[in-house]
Image (tube, rainbow, N blue to C red):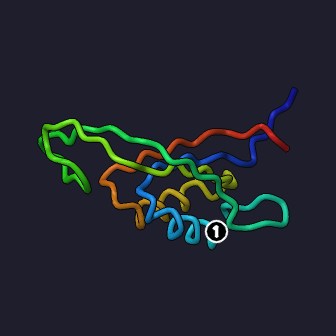
Amino acid sequence: MNIDIRQVKLEIYTPEEFVKPIRDALALIGACRVGNYSHVISCQSTTGSWMPLENSNPYNGTKGEICTGSESKMEVRCPVEKIEEAMQVIRKIHPYEEPLINIIPLLNP
């Protein structure tokens, strides 16, 4: 079987208020498309946990303390050739010093 990966799924964990700006910016570069539809995302509410270390600059939380907070997990399709641009777009908008972004290859044609 010859597998040609053309799209990936981006999983992006972000505060809820950043979902729409990230979605809209990704749609402008050609991500968030499924067939004849644009701005296609799926979001789930989740709880995140983190501990800012000494050299961090946390968006939320206190250095040296384990913190928890509400987040949204965004799932977005993205063409393989747009991954680098998508990462730049996300990092430009996302408030976290190090956003959690998973890139998962999609085998669907």
Rendered residue at 67%/61% (across/down): 32
Horizontal side of 5 relative to 90 (left or right) equals right
Horizontal side of 105 relative to 3 (left or right) equals left
Horizontal side of 57 relative to 101 (left or right) equals left
The image shows residue 98, relative to residue 108, as above or below, that is: below
Give the residue type that dot 1 points to: Ala
Q: Classify the position of the C terminus by image quarter.
A: top right
Rendered residue at 51%/62% (across/down): 19
Rendered residue at 72%/40% (across/down): 106
Q: Position of residue 54 (x, y in %)?
A: 12, 41
Q: Residues within 10 Å of mark 1 (few under 14, many from 20)?
A: many
The image shows residue 25, relative to residue 13, as above or below, that is: below
Horizontal side of 71 relative to 30 (left or right) equals left
Pointer 1 residue: 27
**Residue nearer the viewer, 81 or 96:** 96
Rendered residue at 25%/41% (across/down): 67
The image shows residue 36, relative to residue 12, as above or below, that is: below
Occupied quadrant, residue 97: bottom left
